[in-house]
Image (cartoon, rainbow, N blue to C red):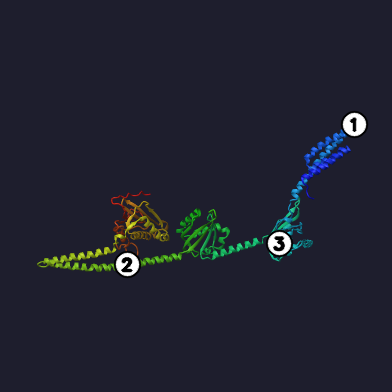
């Protein structure tokens, strides 16, 4: 029945009420006013009904007054009172039905049914017999309501078995029987046959409805299609498996760590390389993986490894370090370790990805090549020095032999009787001539080694030192030597041959590295300092913590050496280069340990007479 609008409802109430008033007047009986009161309560509202009750009481008293020949009797007053009480009861009854009707409309009319449930909805009796299946379930399995009813009327509760995949049937039956016997909710995943014969994965969820005594009255369940979700999960697992296989196959040692630095994954290659079992990368052992790896780092490299790794994890900076790691067979091998953080859109670190590259054979090959180069260079220097010595000896031999011959002749002419002074004077002149020839040979040799003045240019010593440090950085790292630079930022420039000065610094640094070979790795420190010692003198100091200098006076002598296989010409040449530039070179005797070699150069003055003030030391 279609609901009536409020305007129509009030119009009907007014009509019915008018009829009640008319009947009360015609019959002179106020009881008919109850019809008016009911019409007002139903059509307009219970508040208007209370006013109608009061008005009806007054109207009833008026009717009796008009018809009575004297004052109202008790019987007439009692009828008026009954009219008022009956009208009030009628008003209360209408209000009660209004409230009940409201709740019925709101809560019962709007309550969803199993037909409205998304997915395949169903309901069963407490013993498991099916009692309802929503249309979506019928549509999925391809049955009509009558066909499903016939299956349900079978009474064995096994109607649904014909739609479940055979491989999932036994498990589904077991779970359903367990829920029926215990009353526990049912949660199951199974494949269900669609009307076209294909099977799709569904998730069954069912709960028991109970009465106030706790007894099961019915089972209500839904069957949700999760086939696409299962396929997506399977594809994701396959992708993860392929990625894991690729990482385990790549010829590199790969690891992952959480944002706070806890190891979360070690590749199969890394596990085999360090000799850990595959179980080491399971979830329960992830927090313990970092401990054995740190213990496998060489003791000389462990401190720097932990410091660099910790600094990267705290700052988010890239991790890069060469260190020695113990392989499964016990051999320590050089590793080039690198790690980068993975960040989200806001820059927050999500994961660390690292790789360890075995560069031991490469470093050995580089070291072998370096040693071969050094041996070849020494051999070439020795050969050159030998050829130069032969050439010098040949050049000096003739004037020196002539000097000896003329000296003997001079002596014979003097001891002759009588002395032949004229011949002696001629011999003396020849001696002077031959000595001059020898001096000319020496001068030509010096000119040969002296560089022309135009090859010198304005250079910054700090830049020269930094360039040399970049060239020998790998050698310092390979020998575990810590470099300390103390470069005066206000150092003036110098006029010098840049190549020669670089060679001097390189020679001093290499000597320092070789001097610290027998020193423990933690104590190896190479310090290079530049300063303005006086207003016009620059100094470069190279210090080490090696074995020291046994004889500071002789180390600059040609052919004097304390190194096995050395020829003793390096420091002599370095000192010669410094002196040809107007400076000097010396060893600092005040150093308590190690060696400290210093060379000086004149500071550059742009205008004659300008005095360069020493820069303040930091």
In the rendered image, residue 34, in percent from the top left (x then y), is placed at 84, 40
How many marks on residues?
A: 3
Q: Give the secondary structure at mark 2.
A: helix
In the rendered image, residue 410, in percent from the top left (x then y), is placed at 15, 66
The numbered mark, 3 or 1, whose residue comes first in the sequence reads: 1
Residue named by callout 3: 172
Nearer the observer, 520 or 614: 614
In the rendered image, residue 268, in percent from the top left (x then y), is placed at 54, 64
Can you tell which of label 3 and label 1 is closer to the viewer? 1
Snapshot quadrant of residue 597: bottom left
Q: Is residue 544 visible?
A: no
The numbered mark, 2 or 1, whose residue comes first in the sequence reads: 1
Answer left or right for 617 relative to 249.
Answer: left
Residue named by callout 2: 382
Pointer 3 local density, CA inside 10 Å: few below 14, some 14–19, many at least 20: many
Q: What is the spatial separation of the Cα atoms under label 2 and label 1, in whole angstroms?
A: 163 Å
Looking at this view, name the residue that lies furthest to the left. 418
The numbered mark, 3 or 2, whose residue comes first in the sequence reads: 3
Residue named by callout 1: 69
Q: Residue at x 75, y 50 (%)?
A: 108
Answer left or right for 332 relative to 544.
Answer: right
Q: Residue at x 35, y 49 (%)?
A: 615
Q: Give the secondary structure at mark 1.
A: loop
Nearer the observer, 136 or 70: 70
Q: Give the secondary structure at mark 3.
A: helix
Can you tell which of label 2 and label 1 is closer to the viewer? 1
Q: What is the spatial separation of the Cα atoms under label 3 and label 1, in whole angstroms?
A: 91 Å
Q: Is residue 254 visible?
A: yes
Pointer 2 local density, CA inside 10 Å: few below 14, some 14–19, many at least 20: some
């Amino acid at each position: 029945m279609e609901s009536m609008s409020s305007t129509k409802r009030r119009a009907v109430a007014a009509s019915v009420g008018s009829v009640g008033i008319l009947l009360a007047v015609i019959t002179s009986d106020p009881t008919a006013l109850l019809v008016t009161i009911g019409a007002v309560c139903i059509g307009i509202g219970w508040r208007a009904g209370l006013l109608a009750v009061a008005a009806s009481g007054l109207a009833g008293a008026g009717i009796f007054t008009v018809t009575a020949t004297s004052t109202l009797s008790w019987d007439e007053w009692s009828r008026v009172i009954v009219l008022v009480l009956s009208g009030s009861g009628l008003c209360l009854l209408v209000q009660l039905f209004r409230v009940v009707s409201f709740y019925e409309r709101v809560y019962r009319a709007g309550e969803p049914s199993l037909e409205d449930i998304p997915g395949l909805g169903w309901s069963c009796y407490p013993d498991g017999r099916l009692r309802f299946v929503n249309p979506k379930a019928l549509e999925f399995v391809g049955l009509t309501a009558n066909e499903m009813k016939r299956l349900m009327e079978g009474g064995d509760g096994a109607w649904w078995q014909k739609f479940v995949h055979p491989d999932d049937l036994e498990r589904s039956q077991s779970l359903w029987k367990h829920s029926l016997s215990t009353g526990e909710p049912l949660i199951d995943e199974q494949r269900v046959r669609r009307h076209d014969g294909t099977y799709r994965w569904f998730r069954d969820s069912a709960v028991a409805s109970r009465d106030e005594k706790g007894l099961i009255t019915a089972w209500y369940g839904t069957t949700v299609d999760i086939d696409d979700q299962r396929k997506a999960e399977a594809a994701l697992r396959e992708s993860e498996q392929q990625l894991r296989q690729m990482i385990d196959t790549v010829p590199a040692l790969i690891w992952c760590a959480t944002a706070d630095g806890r190891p979360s994954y070690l590749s199969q290659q890394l596990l085999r390389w360090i000799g850990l079992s595959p179980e080491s990368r399971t979830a329960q052992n992830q927090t313990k993986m970092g401990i054995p790896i740190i213990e496998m780092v060489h003791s000389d490299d462990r401190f720097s490894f932990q410091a660099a790794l910790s600094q990267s994890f705290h700052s988010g900076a890239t991790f890069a370090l060469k260190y020695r790691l113990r392989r499964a067979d016990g051999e320590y091998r050089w590793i080039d370790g690198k790690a980068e953080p993975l960040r989200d859109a806001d820059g927050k670190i999500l994961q660390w990805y690292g790789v360890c590259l075995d560069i031991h054979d490469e470093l050995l090959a580089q070291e072998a090549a370096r040693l071969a180069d050094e041996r070849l260079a020494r051999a070439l220097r020795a050969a050159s020095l030998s050829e130069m010595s032969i050439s010098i000896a040949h050049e000096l031999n003739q004037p020196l032999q002539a000097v000896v011959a003329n000296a003997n002749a001079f002596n014979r002419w003097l001891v002759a009787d009588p002395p032949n002074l004229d011949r002696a004077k001629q011999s003396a002149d020849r001696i002077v001539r031959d000595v001059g020839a020898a001096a000319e040979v020496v001068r030509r040799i010096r000119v040969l080694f002296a560089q022309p003045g135009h090859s010198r240019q304005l250079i910054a010593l700090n830049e020269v030192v930094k360039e040399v440090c970049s060239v020998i950085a790998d050698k310092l790292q390979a020998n575990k030597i810590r470099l300390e630079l103390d470069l005066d930022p206000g150092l003036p420039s110098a006029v010098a041959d840049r190549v020669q000065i670089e060679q001097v610094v390189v020679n001093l640094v290499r000597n320092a590295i070789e001097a610290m070979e027998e020193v423990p790795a933690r104590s190896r420190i190479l310090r290079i300092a530049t300063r303005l010692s006086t207003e016009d003198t620059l100094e470069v100091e190279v210090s080490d913590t090696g074995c020291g200098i046994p004889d500071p006076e002789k180390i600059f002598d040609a052919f004097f050496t304390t190194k096995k296989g050395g020829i003793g010409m390096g420091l002599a040449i370095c000192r010669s280069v410094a002196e040809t530039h107007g400076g000097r070179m010396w060893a600092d005797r005040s150093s308590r340990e190690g060696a400290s070699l210093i060379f000086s150069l004149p500071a550059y003055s742009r205008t004659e007479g300008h005095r360069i003030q020493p820069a303040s030391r930091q």
